Image: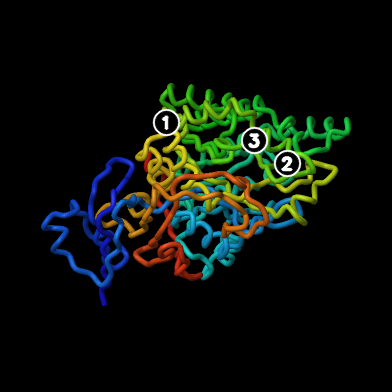
Amino acid sequence: MSSRKIIRGGLVITASDEIHADVLIEDGRIAALAASGTSAAEAWSAEQVIDATGKYVIPGGVDAHTHMELPFGGTFASDTFETGTRAAAWGGTTTIVDFAVQSVGHTLREGLDAWHAKAEGNCAIDYAFHMIVSDVNQDTLKEMDLLVEEGVTSFKQFMAYPGVFYSDDGQILRAMQRSADNGGLIMMHAENGIAIDVLVEQALARGETDPRYHGEVRKALLEAEATHRAIKLAQVAGAPLYVVHVSAMEAVAELARARDEGLNVFGETCPQYLFLSTDNLAEPDFEGSKYVCSTPLRPKEHQAKLWQGLRTNDLQVVSTDHCPFCFVGQKELGRGDFSKIPNGLPGVENRMDLLHQAVVDGHISRRRWIEIACATPARMFGMYPKKGTIAPGADADVVIYDPHAEQIVSAETHHMNVDYSAYEGKRLTGRVETVLSRGELVITEREYTGHAGHGVYTPRSTCQYLN
């Protein structure tokens, strides 16, 4: 039995076009587009017609950086794949790329299998995996080739967190050399963790224990230094590089310089760096712990440079680095010692709305909104045009978006499994109304109509900016 739906009368926005068009969906895919009111569009029939008059019709968001159920600092991220993907859908995101973790002493395969077990049958939307490489050795390098062949085509390394995820320059170079050969993409957490650990120790010895010191010890210069070093190692290896969660203007400058030299270097930032700052980290009564993440929040003056980087394409992607920990019982582990506060913020539900607010505020255009939130992450990680656009043949991952609806962000009304919102009280213009994932209604006029297990694992091709 074929199933057909029509979305009528909306403004279809992709990274390249804006057109008043009707969208025909058949068997989970986009079958056709036709200008609204034309005989071609009027000739269509379907079991269900969705009226999008006065609304935007946009591709489902692709959040290429989430951490559901991540073990960190003696606890776990509070969103499961079930709660996290449901919240993502509420926020207009229809695909996440989460991080499977290799533990030191274990294989990549063991880590990947463990994450498949967590996600399978539990997701409301489609999902894929990157692989965190914590233990570079000859066996790991061989496994990287096998993973690329089966659709896990990106590998994250850390210049931070010595003793946990940290890789030294030699390990990084070996992994980059391997990815240069197998077509994989190295994603880098670029902070000088060795130097940061010295500054943490010195701050705690001085009695500087409050959350705001988390931002002060993780210096912007140490993000810039690590970004520069990662770029040079990638250049030596002849490999592409994707720097995650860029927060400092000095790091943006390093990326811009590399791109001006014609290198395959890419950068991602996150809503928290665009909308929050060290003012939040300094909130009294340990409230600042809610905003502890790494890379850390920066002083407000960095925000303008991040927006500029998004406009000039020195930064290409906005992902969330969604890694929620409850204030009560989790963030509180760091009372009296900021270094013990679990690092991470909730945000998977807020990204599309915050970026629409950026359109309203004049930071970016509507098409750039779709580009940085849908199309580019899909291309960067080998899922385009199946994901990230509205075009014949694409998965029918579609959001009906009301650009005029007003909302106030609050933990009272969000769907993430966490007891606070990083954007509590923020007024936003624009809101998700209806969400389809592969043609199935997951959110129907602000009601959740999806279910765990609808979302399927999505193998990926290699980065589409290198072909």
Q: Is residue 231 above or below residue 458?
A: above
Instruction: Give residue 313's mark.
Output: 1
Residue 427 drawn at (x, y percent):
53, 44
Task: Judge left or right: residue 224 versus residue 18.
Answer: right
Between residues 235 and 346, which one lies in front from this camera angle?
346
**Location of mark 3 (residue):** 297
Asked whether residue 106 is in view, the answer is no
Q: Name the residue rendered at 29%, 49% in the picture.
A: 12
Q: How busy is the neighbourhood of tag 2: few (under 14 within 10 Å), some, or many (20 plus)?
A: many
Report the amino acid beneath label 3.
Leu
Q: Is residue 170 above or below residue 118?
A: above
Report the amino acid beneath label 1.
Asn
Callout 2 secondary element: helix
| N-terminal-most mark, 2 or 3 | 2
| N-terminal-most mark, 1 or 2 | 2
Q: Name the residue rendered at 37%, 58% in the picture.
A: 397
**Location of mark 2 (residue):** 288
| N-terminal-most mark, 1 or 3 | 3
